Image: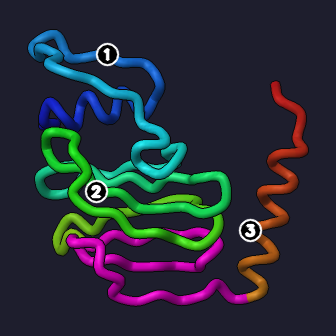
Amino acid sequence: MLSIASAVTVAAFAGVAHAAPELDVLASAALGDDLGGRPVAVGLVEGGVVLASQGPQDGSVVRLDGFGAPAGAAPLAGRVDDLAVDRRTGDIAVIGDAGLTVFGPDLDVLWQRPLPPAARASRCAGLTSASAAPSQ
């Protein structure tokens, strides 16, 4: 079951705010510059949510508490593509230009690995071909 803040945060992430009929929306906010840029990925963590966001040049990972207030942040070099949360440990894995970075629940870097050249090339080729494809 999502908490009120999680439901509102996920709804705001999607760009349209909707609440379940049994919830009263007490407050809402648009995510953006206050949290480091445009959100690109979201994951649920113990007591809140974690967002990967993309600024004009660099990305960041932001943890929000159950009330939607920032509870921590970590900068990342370059573009951020996605994140995943290990529900057992609370560790947060982020993939992007900086490679694969794993953070602990408190956003301390546990380890970081650059992507191999072949993975970087195929990742860039996939993004280029996907962005060049005509929309249906």
Against 86, is 30 above or below? above
* Circle 3 SS class: helix
| Mark seen at residue 123 | 3
Q: Nearer the viewer, mark 3 or mark 2?
A: 2
Q: Residue furthest top?
A: 21
Amino acid type assigned to the residue bearing label 3 in the image? Arg
Q: Nearer the viewer, mark 1 or mark 2?
A: 2
**Magenta residues (range):** 91-116
* Circle 1 SS class: loop
Q: Quadrant of residue 114?
A: bottom right
Amino acid type assigned to the residue bearing label 1 in the image? His
Q: Residue at x 58, y 59 (%)?
A: 81
In the picture of the structure, the residue carrying the numbered disc 1 is 18
Asked if disc 1 and disc 2 are in contact, CB closer than 8 Å, the reply is: no
Q: Nearer the viewer, residue 95 or 39?
A: 39
Q: Quadrant of residue 87?
A: bottom left
Q: Going by the image, does 3 lie left or right of 58?
A: left
Q: Residues within 10 Å of mark 2 (few under 14, many from 20)?
A: many
Residue 110 image point, x, y percent: 33, 87
Against 20, is 1 above or below? below
In terms of sequence position, does the residue under pointer 3 or pointer 2 come before the other?
A: 2
Q: Going by the image, does 16 lie left or right of 3?
A: right
In the picture of the structure, the residue carrying the numbered disc 2 is 63
Classify the position of the N terminus by image quarter: top left
| Mark seen at residue 37 | none
